[in-house]
Image (cartoon, grey):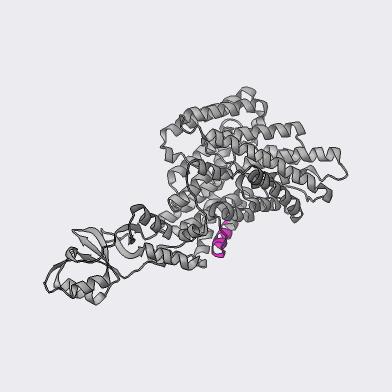
Amino acid sequence: MRKHIDNYRQLLTNYDSLLAYSLLGVLGGVASGLVILAFEKAIVLVATLWAVGNDGEDFESLPLELRFLLPALAALALGVVYRLLRPEDRETGIVHVLSRMHSHYGALPVRNALVQFFGGAFALGSGLSGGREGPGVHLGSAVNSLIGQRLVLPNNSLRVLIACGTAGGIAAAFNTPLAGVIFAMEVIVAEYTVAGFIPVMLAAVSASAVSRTFAGGGAAFVLPELQLVSLAEIPYIVFLGFVCGLAVVAFIHIARFTARFANIDVTLRFTVVGVITGLLAMGVPQIMGIGYDTLNLALQGQVAVALLLLIAAAKIVATAISAGVGMPVGIIGPNLLIGACLGGALGHLGQQFMPELASHPMLYILIGMGAAMGAVMSAPLAALLAVIELTHSIEIGMPAMLAIVAANLTSAGLFRQRALHQAILRQLQRVVPDDPLNQLLHRTHVGSIMDTRVVRVPSQLSEEDRVLLLESSPTWCLVTREGEDLYLIEGSALLAWLQQQDAEQVDITDADIRRWTMTNVPMQANLRQAWDSISKQTVEAACVFGRSRTASKPILHGVVTRESIEKFTLARL
């Protein structure tokens, strides 16, 4: 079994090993699907503790005082727990996933995943405003990354596992596998390659199959066939996109403003957010929790126009401040509700004033959902496909596309606003580059270019050692003394110097040979990690070491130089 795993690891070092990565995609999809189902059950279980019915959605039936006390006290309790955690253990969601993908090469820690699971379930089940999709992306990515770390898979495969977890998380939550695939490639991986698509597609299908098997999941919303009545509606649809774009701009501004208070005690921050949410919930209880029950009511036309606008405004405030202070909740679901409310309001107004031209308000609700989601995540294609998959109708594609484009142009073009996760990363001064060079370095294993003709040599060489060294003719020699690695020298230079020596025992440190400074990287490292280690230590090369099951000392596998990485990237780009 161990031999098979070793062979599998070796296959994964090659990014183009489609069969190996396909197996990884299926494994990742099943794992993410199961963890998302567990997370959803946990939310319902918490809500049931507070006697919230309708699968943890019916917060509207709670008494007035409980609508205030439940989110306020839950936020206080969450803040107390967070205060006991280290600041690095508190980080959750998409921001955490993107940050760790680049700063730790896809290694997501288990502590943050546990905080996301239990903290997110407690927050959403207790009426704090947020969504389950952002936590789902984190949990799906984390469980896959942890599996990869447990199996000691190469770091370039962890990146694919995270993409599989993302796609699986979205697919399991909405039963929209295609949207999950595009979201993973558009937001998390930020590149499109055939080798990257295939395992992610398999993960989305696997997660969706898990959801249907264990939760009976069909479409997230049951909808009739919808289509545009008249092309005269196009300007009105563009206007809906503009309105949704404005709402997203307000949402991001509030979240960014709230994030400025990160230096204030976490318990105080969370409590203030809980109090504000509770006060809003006293008048607009529909903002509590995830809010999909309200979304279904809006789709059925059972919510008045004034209330739709009020829900949208209150949901923007409650969710934006929750996301801004770092609560373990998501923003995708709330923005779907915000877009739905705005679309529903404009749809009802259109039918009232232009009944012969206006389409069914449900069409505007769905278009608004896509527009808001696409703008807040800067993921227009994923949002478009989500709307099409939710409706099972390609006819909605054209009007949805117009609204999504209008919303993105309003947010990014007119107001120069980044997606919320990008804005938060920038505010935290974290660089998450997605240029072709970095993408290439992240997906390439060190084994692709490392020189394996390397040996350890003691600084003191006997006659026998010299004979063996001359016979092996290595490219690189790692000079050691008393078990300590000193520096690298080129094998040809060392052999030439040895041929000039007559003494039975020689000291290599006396040789007038160029010494290459070096650092160490693990065998599962990618080229990005090797380059970062070389740059950070200001050295010329990285020695690649692997763990040994028998020897106490790591095994030296090869050498990667700064020059070899530069030549590789220049040849590929």
Q: In this view of the protein, can residue 39 be seen by the observer?
A: yes
User: What residue do we see at 69% from left, 41% from top?
Assistant: 244
- Please tell me whether residue 393 is drawn above or below residue 2 in the rendered image: above
Q: Is residue 492 left or right of residue 320?
A: left
Question: Quick one: quadrant of the N terminus?
Answer: bottom left
Query: Relative to the observer, which residue lies in front, 200 or 484?
Result: 484
Q: Depth check: give the residue in front, 504 or 150.
A: 504
Q: Residue furthest right?
A: 356
Is residue 241 found left or right of 555 in the rendered image? Answer: right
Magenta stretch in the rendered image: 191-203
Whether residue 196 is in magenta: the answer is yes
Residue at the top extreme of this rendering:
65
Dominant SS of magenta comes to: helix
Q: Judge left or right: residue 296 versus residue 254.
A: right
Q: How many marks?
A: 0
Q: Is residue 254 above or below residue 221?
A: above
The quadrant where residue 448 appears:
bottom left
At a point 12% along the width and 74% down the height, the residue shown is 502
> Is residue 4 visible in this depiction of the protein?
no
Residue 296 screen position, x and y as percent: 71, 40
List x then y, in percent, for residue 323: 55, 37
Q: What residue do we see at 66% from left, 47% from top?
A: 408
> Residue 499, percent across and down?
18, 75
Could you tell me residue 223's position as x and y percent?
A: 74, 47
Is 535 part of what is drawn in magenta? no
- 10 and 530: which one is in front? 530
